[in-house]
Image (cartoon, rainbow, N blue to C red):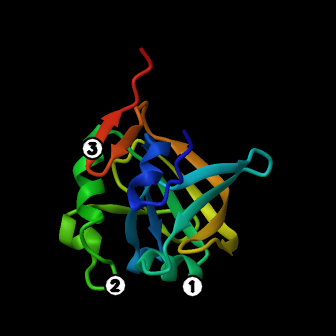
């Protein structure tokens, strides 16, 4: 029995997905957004693709300023994932509003202080893919601050740490 899938929720059939927080823009005006639509595109060079809607302020930030960080999170940052998705950086300084400290990345952007790991990235290309844009990000630096268990989005607002057992 074949059934054509067309509902908005159908993409959840590809879940669970590791959740990251993308920090875009120069340090002084940095913005953060949770993202589940991302993938490794190449090992050499190390390229990551992140899919972002043109309706998101993060899209504009990443279009205007080519440097960003990909912040890898664990369950300690689940509330931050939920809170950063509830407001737009266009209208509010998310770092200030949410009481999150940022640190200066070597590429001039910011990363979340206390995050377990992050990648510094540079936008090298982008492709419009329908209602989202796939940004191609070249990893220029990787930092592992401490061991961690990645947080995965099961669907909607359901999250779970990645379990290896």
Closer to the N terminus: mark 3 or mark 1? 1
Residue 56 in the image: state x and y as whole percent.
Answer: 42, 77
Count residues near mark 1 (Cα–Cα under 10 Å), then give few for <14, some for 14-19, many for 20+: few
Snapshot quadrant of residue 120: bottom right
Judging from the image, what secondary structure is the residue with disc 1 in? helix
Which residue does the numbered mark 2 point to in the structure image? 90
Residue 23 in the image: state x and y as whole percent.
Answer: 44, 65
In this view, the residue in front, 140 or 31, is: 31
Q: Say which quadrant the N terminus sits in.
A: top right
Closer to the N terminus: mark 3 or mark 2? 2
Image height check: is 155 above or below 136? Answer: above
Which residue does the numbered mark 1 point to in the structure image? 64
Image height check: is 59 above or below 81? Answer: below
Mark 3–mark 1 distance (CA, rounded to whole Å)? 32 Å
Residue 158: which disc? 3
Residue 49: which disc? none
Indicate left or right for 91 with 151 as reference. left
Indicate left or right for 118 with 45 as reference. left
**Which callout, 3 or 2, points to the residue nearer the camera?**
3
Residue 164 in the image: state x and y as whole percent.
Answer: 44, 19
Query: Residue farthest to the top?
Result: 165
């Amino acid at each position: 029995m074949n059934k054509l899938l067309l509902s908005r929720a159908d993409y959840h059939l590809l879940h669970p997905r590791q959740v990251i927080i993308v920090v875009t823009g120069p340090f002084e005006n940095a913005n953060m957004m949770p993202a589940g639509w991302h993938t490794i595109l190449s090992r050499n060079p190390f390229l990551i693709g992140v899919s972002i809607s043109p309706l998101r302020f993060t899209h504009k930030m990443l279009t205007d300023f080519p440097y960003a960080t990909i912040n890898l999170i664990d369950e300690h940052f689940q509330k931050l994932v939920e809170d950063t998705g509830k407001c737009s950086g266009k209208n509010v300084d998310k770092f200030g509003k949410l009481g999150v400290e940022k640190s200066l990345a070597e590429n001039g952007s910011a990363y979340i202080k206390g995050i377990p790991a992050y990648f510094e990235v540079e936008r090298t290309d982008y492709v419009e893919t329908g209602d989202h844009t796939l940004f191609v990000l070249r990893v220029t630096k990787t930092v592992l601050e401490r061991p961690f268990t990645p947080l995965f989005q099961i669907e909607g607002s359901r999250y779970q740490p990645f379990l290896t057992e």
